Amino acid sequence: MTFEQALARLEQIVKELEGGNVPLDDLMRLYDEGTTLVKACTEKITAAEQKVRLVQMKNGAVTEEAFEGQ
């Protein structure tokens, strides 16, 4: 599953949970799925940050610069 797919599913889960009409068994299943997706997204972001740091290497030293996201 790509980051974008995981994030889209996570957003869908949040909408379902915010609706408030989810039976307890489904709520627990969705919560479990959501926490798994959050972990997967976090791991993908961490891996991407590490790749960015590698690309920034200059003269054997990593230059840390703040990322100015959109």
Image: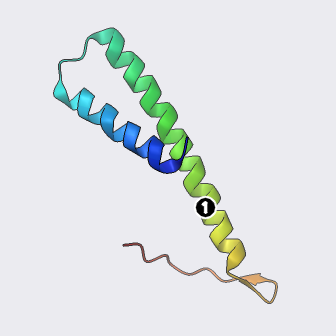
The residue at which mark 1 appears reads as 48
Residue 44: x %, y % from top left: 58, 51
Q: Is residue 67 above or below residue 24?
A: below
**Residue at 47 percent of width and 40 percent of height:** 38
**Residue at 66 percent of width and 64 percent of height:** 50
**Residue at 60 percent of width and 56 percent of height:** 46
- Amino acid of disc 1: Ala
Judged left or right of residue 56, residue 66 is: left
Q: Is residue 49 above or below residue 55?
A: above
In which quadrant of the rendered view does residue 70 lie?
bottom left
**Residue at 82 percent of width and 84 percent of height:** 60
* Quadrant, the N terminus: top right
Disc tally is 1
Residue 62: x %, y % from top left: 71, 80
How crowded pointer 1 is (Cα within 10 Å; few <14, some 14-19, many 20+) is rated as: few
Q: Secondary structure at mark 1?
A: helix
Q: Is residue 49 above or below residue 4?
A: below
Judged left or right of residue 60, residue 34 is: left
Residue 63: x %, y % from top left: 66, 83
The residue positioned farthest toward the bottom in the image shown: 59
Q: How is the image coloured?
A: rainbow
Q: Is residue 13 above or below residue 7?
A: above
Residue 54: x %, y % from top left: 72, 73
In which quadrant of the rendered view does residue 11 lie?
top left
